[in-house]
Amino acid sequence: MPEASYDVFRYLGATEHAEAYREIMRAFAAAKQRFIVHVRPEELSGVASGVDPGALLKQLVDWGNLKADPDTSRVATVEEFNRARFVYQLTAAGESAERALSEFDRTFGAAGELQSWALDDIVDQLNAIIVQLALATPDEAKVALALTTLSDRFTGLATNAQAFSGDLQRTIDLRGVDTEAFIAYKERLIGYLQRFIQDLVTRTAEIASLLERIPATDAERALRMVAVRQARDAAPAADDAARHAEPDVLEPILGQWRDRFDGFRQWFVGSAGAVSQSQRLRHMAINAVPALLGVVQRLGEQRAGRSDRVADFRSLAVWFAEAPDDAHRHRLAAVAFGLASARHLGIEEHELDERERHPVSATTAWADAPAVEISPRLRATGSYERRGQPSRVRDRAAERRAIARAVEAQRVAADRLSAQLVADEPGTIADVELVDPAARALLLHLLGDALAQRRDPLETVTVASLDGAYRVEVEPHPDAVASLAMPDGVLTGPAHRIRIGHAR
C-alpha cells in the first residue's frame, strides 16, 4: 500500500487565504458532482472574492490537491501557444480529502436520533434473508443486497443512538436555559422517548426471534455469499503482481462480515453474562424520563426564588477570591459557616471593634476573659425579645389526610394488580384474567422484558420489573399456541408458561 500523503490538508492551516483555498476546493468538488472534469481559472473568479485564483491554484497543485494540464483548446496563434494556460482537475488524493472534510462537516454537531424506522427495515431484511436461505438455491444477489442493507441500517441506528445518548445527557445537564422553552421541549422529548421505547421493546423481541431462526451454518453461508460477490470485484494490488502471487482477498472480506454480524447479534441478543446494547439503550431512554422531570423541577424551584446551593457556594468562592487578605477570609468563613466563638452572645458593635484590636483566644477561661455586657432584659427575662402572642401554628391535618388517601389508593391499586397477575403456579397467558387495563400493560411489559433477555428458544428466563416489585419467570412451550382476548384485540403467541410473583 502506498504511503499516505497528508499535504492535501495543508491548506486548512494556511496562514493566508485559508478560506479562499477552502472555497476553491468546494467549487472543484461541486464541479465533480456535476461531472465537470476540468475547470479554468477564469471560472473561479467569483469564488475566491478579492484574491487572484491563479497563485492559489498553483499552490494547490504543489500540495497535490489539483492537477494542472496545458489548455490548448483555445489556441489560435503562436503567442497564445507559448503563453502558459492550464486547466485544473482534482487529484485522487485531493478528492479523497474533500470527501473526508465534507463528511466531517456533515456529521460534526449533527443531532442524534432514535430511528424506529431502521428497526422496521432490519426486520424486513432479516425476513428476506430467511426466505432466501430456505430455498434450495438462494439468489446470491438478493442475499447480498439484504445483508448490505441490513449492515447500513444497523450502522446508522447504532451511530445515531450513540449520538442521541450524548445529546440527551447534555440536555439533562443544561444550565441557564429558558424555563418555558425547556418545559415545552421536555414534553416533546418525553413523548419521543416513550414512542421509541415501545417500538424498541416490540422490535427487539421480534429481531431476536428472527436471529434464532438463522442457524450458525446458514449465517456463515449467507456471509460467504456476500463476501465472494464482493471479492469478485476487488482490484488487484501492486505488491501481489510484483510477487507473482494470487491475492487472497476473500478471507479478509469474510472476516469483516463475520465481525459485523456478530456485533449485530450482540447488539440485539447479547451474550452469556452480558446485557445487549438494545436493552442498555432502552434503560437509558427510560432513565432519561425521570432525569428530565428532575431538570424541570430544578428550573421551577429556581424560578420560584428558592435557594440554589450550588449558586450560593459559587458566590461564596468569588467572595473568598476577592478578599484582600487571610484575616478577611477568616472573618468571612466565620460569618458564612457560623464559626464564631461562644463569646459573641449579646456583643455590641463597639465591642466587636475592641475584640478585633485585642482578640481573645478560644481556649481562654471565662474567668480570665474580659467581661461581656449583658442586657438587663436578657438578665431579667432570659430573652432579648418582648413577650407576646406567638405565631399561630398552621394546621396541616387536611394535607396529611390527603397524603394518607393517596397512599391507600396506591396500595389498593397494587393489591388489585397482584390479585390479577401474581400466581403460585405457572400458566399460559390464556389463564390470566385481566380486568384492569394497568394489569394488561404490566403483563405485556414483563413479558417483553423476559423475551428480550432470552438467548435460546428453549431457555427459561427470569427477570424483575423495573421497580423491583415483581419477578416473572417464562418457560418456553413452542409446540402450543395461546391467546388472550383484550378490549383492543387478541394477543396470540407461543404458549409460554408464565409465573409472576412478588420480588423477595
Image (cartoon, helix red, strand yellow):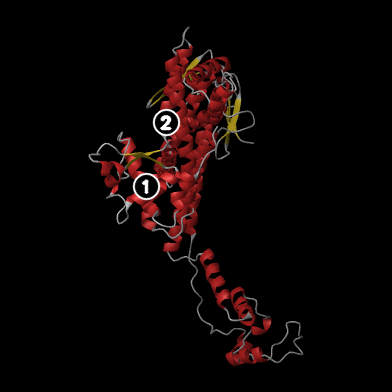
Q: Which residue is painted at 69% across and 91% down in the image? A: 358
Which sits in the foreground, 190 or 124?
Answer: 124
Instruction: Look at label 1 and name its amino acid.
Output: Leu
- Mark 1 crowd level (few <14, some 14–19, many ≥20, 10 Å Cα): many
Q: Is residue 90 left or right of residue 360?
A: left
Observer-side mark, 2 or 1, equals 1
User: Closer to the camera, 430 or 202?
Assistant: 202
Is the residue 234 above or below the residue 52 in the image? above
Is residue 470 shown left or right of residue 158? Answer: right
Give the answer, above or below, for where 127 lies relative to 22. Answer: above
Q: Nearer the viewer, residue 409 or 295?
A: 295
Q: Which mark is residue 57?
A: 1
Residue 334 placement (x, y as % from top left): 63, 77
Please tell me which residue is depicted at 35% across the width and 44% down the height of the picture.
26
Question: In this view, which residue lies farthest toward the front?
Answer: 78
Q: Residues within 10 Å of mark 2 (few under 14, many from 20)?
A: some
Residue at the left extreme of this rendering? 76
Q: CA distance from mark 2 to mark 1?
A: 44 Å
Quadrant in the picture for the C terminus: top right
The residue under label 2 is 118
